[in-house]
Structure formats: C-alpha cells, structure tokens
Amino acid sequence: MPEPTSSSVPTDAPAPVTRTKTSAYPIEHFVADVDETPVRATDSAVTDAAPSSLWAEAWRNLRRQPLFIISAVLILAVIFVALFPGVFTDEPPNENCLLENSDGGPAPGHPLGFTVQGCDILSRVVYGTQSSLTVGLFATLGVVIIGGLIGALAGFFGGWVDAILARLGDIFFALPLILGAIVVVQLPAFQQNRNVWTLVVILVAFGWPQIARITRAAVIEVRNADFITAARSLGVSTFGALVKHAIPNALAPVIVIATISLGTFIVAESTLSFLGIGLPPDVMSWGNDIFAAKPSLRSNPMAIFWPGLALSITVLSFIMLGDALRDALDPKARKR
C-alpha cells in the first residue's frame, strides 16, 4: 500500500500527548483566593502626577538635613544681628570710650568687657556685623553677575568667544585674591577713598574667574541638550535659548560655589582690615577689631576672641550651607 502523505492527515487531529512518569508522592498546590490577597495601595502608581522639579526635590532633601538646618539658623541669626543691632546693645560703638576702662573685664551693661581704647566689645562686635556681611554679600552678588555672564557666553557660543573670554579669565585667575587686592588698594584712587564699596569693587575684580569657570562648564553640559534643540527649532533665538533655558538649568553649581564664596569674601575683608589696608579704622568691622586688639593679645585676649569667634561662626555657617546645597543639588554628590 502506498504510504499516506502529509496532505492526507487531517489538520484537526489532536496532538499526541506525551506522558511522563510522575513521582510516587502526590503533589499538592495551595492557591489562595483572590479575595484574600487584595492589591496593596503601595503597588499602585500615580501616572497623571506632574514630575518633581530639581528645586522641589532639592528642597525636600534639604529639609531633612541637620547640616542645612543648623547653618540656616546661624545665618538667619547673623542677618538679624546686622539688621537690628539695637536689639542686642544700647551702647554706641564709638562713643563712651573711656581710657580708664582700657582692657577692662566684664562689667554691668558690658558683658564682654572693653577694648584697649575703653570701648564696649559687645557693641563693636554687633555693629561690625553690618560691614563684614555687606562686603561679603555684595561681593558675591557682583562675582555671580559678572562671572556668570562671562562664563555663560563662553560656554554657550564657544569658538573665538570662548577662546577670548577663557584666556581673560585665566589672566585674572592667576592673580591671588588677597595679593591682588593688596596691590590695588595701595593705588591713590583707592587709598584715599577706602570704604565698603571700594573694597567690594576690588574683591569682585579678582574674584569673578572662579564663578566664570563653573558657569562655563555647566552651560557646556546643557547647550546640546534636547530642550535647547527643541527651543531653537520652535524659533527661539540663540540669546533667548541662553537666557531662558541654558542659564536656569546651569544655576545649581553656581549657587553652591557662590554660597561658599560669600564666606571667603568675608574672610578677605577681615584679612585686609587686619593688615591695615582694608576698611578705615572708623568703620566697624571684625577685621578692624582684631587689628586694634593685637597689641593687647597677652593682657586682654578676649578683645580678639569675641570678634574672631563671630567671624568664624559666620564663615563656617556659609561653608556648611554650601556643602548642604551641593549634596541636594548635585545627584552625583548626594549622600545616600
């Protein structure tokens, strides 16, 4: 007989069943009812919620950091002392200075004692907060504006613009901040008009290259991002894309460096005043108080201790705030 071909086999024939040898012991499966295992609420996902922005996520992380809370409280306290010095002392800083109280210890109404000139130490420390904080704040604001603008232009446009601005920044970056300020402040134009604002101008002139470098690197990272390309394709100009999209997305590292730089500029002002070439002696500042108390270091060390303590706490607060902001704004450096 002819062998049946494949076409002669019915297509609806059942597939052969392969039987395997089972174990001698029966296998029991226990399956819970669906009603006994409800889906937990944690397994559900909200898909229509708006994603958190970088700043919202950073604020959520900052509120849980003790370092941020401590530094913020200290900075707010320093700002309050600078704005309302009369709350802490009724004694004018440059008045009622009697030589009979020279290097005197604590007395009623004068809990920190007296300077070598017989002035109240508490009053001078409290009123010195204004000058030191003003120099640090406006110097930081100036370097962020000038350095941020130069760095953003260099990083976004590149080419010859980047070459010129980067080399200009290298020239100023090679000059140390304190050394450059010492040289410039000796010029007659600055020597005869020493005040808070001339000192701010000098610090800004030598302090902007660091911010410029940070901003340039941050803008280079985002200038080729998809949202920049999308903005340009929708008709946004090059300068508009820089201002509206590139700079806002490059602000995180700039804010961190600016916060730390504020403490650096306060130290720079105190250093120049301690050398006698910063603020004039009639201006209240922590650097001037430390310089004035230098001759009486052995006989009355408290005259140097209190302004030095105020300076250290303020600078340390801004450094701690910068570290907390870095951990919150930089995902790579964020503490787990």
Image: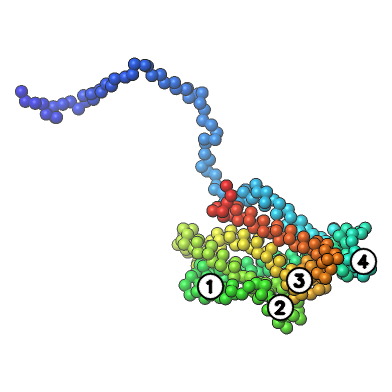
Q: Are marks 2 and 3 in contact (CB under 8 Å)?
A: no
Q: Residue at the location (20% across, 27% down)?
A: 11
Q: Which residue is mark 2?
A: 185
Dot 2 or dot 3: first in sequence order is 2
Name the mark nearer the viewer: 1 or 4.
4
Q: Nearer the viewer, residue 178 or 41?
A: 178
Marks 2/4: CA–CA distance: 34 Å
Label at residue 330? none
* 10 Å crowding of disc 1: few (<14), some (14-19), many (20+): many
Q: Residue at the location (14% across, 29% down)?
A: 6
Disc 3 element:
helix
Locate residue 188, reporting x and y percent: 73, 83
Give the amino acid type for the residue marked by disc 1 in the picture.
Ala
* 10 Å crowding of disc 4: few (<14), some (14-19), many (20+): some
Q: Which residue is mark 1?
A: 166
Marks 4/3: CA–CA distance: 23 Å
Disc 4 element:
helix
